[in-house]
């Protein structure tokens, strides 16, 4: 699995139109916190029980369409869930997985707040909120 900062991932996505960009956060995070523009949403785990989505790999495979070699870029809040999701995809045979380090909201600052140290939004990359 490759690892890219949000800016590196954005540049990669711009240069690689066949890449599939997936937000693996919960549905509520995706809808209410916002999400990267153009990202597909497939939860790795979701409330209320926060169990791993048993259909995650199958849903990604359906989106990928071109097979297990299609470049896939995964993002979550801070880079941890996307790392676990990427490992599951690799175990299922996907060969071109990239994890976005620092995720959408970034690491915690000294006051335990996000969006103030790093991450997709902190870097000013395109995002949407419904």
Image: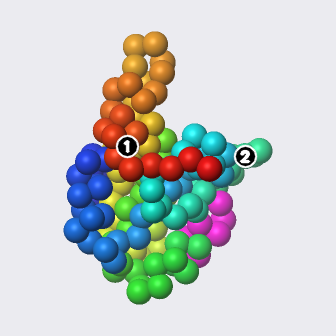
User: In the picture, residue 52 is in which quadrant?
Assistant: bottom right
Mark sitting on residue 47: 2
Q: Nearer the viewer, mark 2 or mark 1?
A: 1
* SS for callout 1: loop
Label whose residue precedes the other's in the sequence (2 or 1):
2
65 relative to 2, above or below: below
Would you say 56 lies left or right of 38 here?
right
Of 108 and 51, nearer the camera is 108
| Viewer-side residue, 16 vs 59 | 16
Q: Is residue 37 magenta?
A: no
Q: Secondary structure at mark 2?
A: loop
Query: x, y (%) of residue 115?
Result: 42, 30
Task: Confirm whether the magenta stretch covers residue 56.
Answer: yes
The magenta span reads 53-58
* Residue marked by disc 1: 120
In the image, 50: left or right of 112? right
Residue at image position (34%, 46%) is 125
Q: Position of residue 3 (x, y in %)?
A: 28, 52
Given residues 72 and 121, the one toward you in this image is 121
Residue drawn 77% across the image and 44% down it: 48
Q: In this view, which residue lies farthest toward the right?
A: 48
Q: Is residue 28 left or right of residue 21?
A: right
- Tell me the quadrant of the picture where the N terminus can be found: bottom left
Q: What is the CA distance from the residue labelled 2 to the residue labelled 1? A: 23 Å
**Is the residue marked by circle 1 packed among few (<14), some (14-19), or many (20+) residues within 10 Å?**
many
Q: Can residue 78 be seen in the rendering of this structure?
A: no
Residue 42 horizontal/vertical position (percent):
58, 62
Residue 130 locus on image (x, y percent)? 62, 50
Mark 2, residues whose alpha carbon is within 10 Å: few (<14), some, or many (≥20)? few
**Within the image, what quadrant is residue 14 found in?**
bottom left
């Amino acid at each position: 699995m490759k690892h890219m900062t949000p800016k590196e991932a954005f540049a990669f996505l711009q240069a690689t139109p066949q890449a599939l960009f997936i937000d693996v956060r919960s549905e509520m995070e995706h809808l209410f916190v916002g999400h990267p523009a153009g990202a597909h949403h497939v939860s790795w785990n979701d409330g209320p029980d926060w169990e791993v989505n048993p259909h995650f790999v199958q849903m990604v495979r359906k989106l990928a369409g071109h097979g297990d070699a299609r470049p896939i870029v995964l993002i979550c809040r801070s880079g941890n869930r996307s790392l676990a999701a990427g490992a599951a995809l690799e175990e299922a045979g996907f060969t071109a997985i990239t994890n976005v380090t620092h995720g959408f909201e970034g690491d915690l600052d000294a006051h335990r707040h996000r969006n103030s140290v790093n991450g997709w939004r902190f870097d000013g990359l395109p995002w949407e909120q419904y």
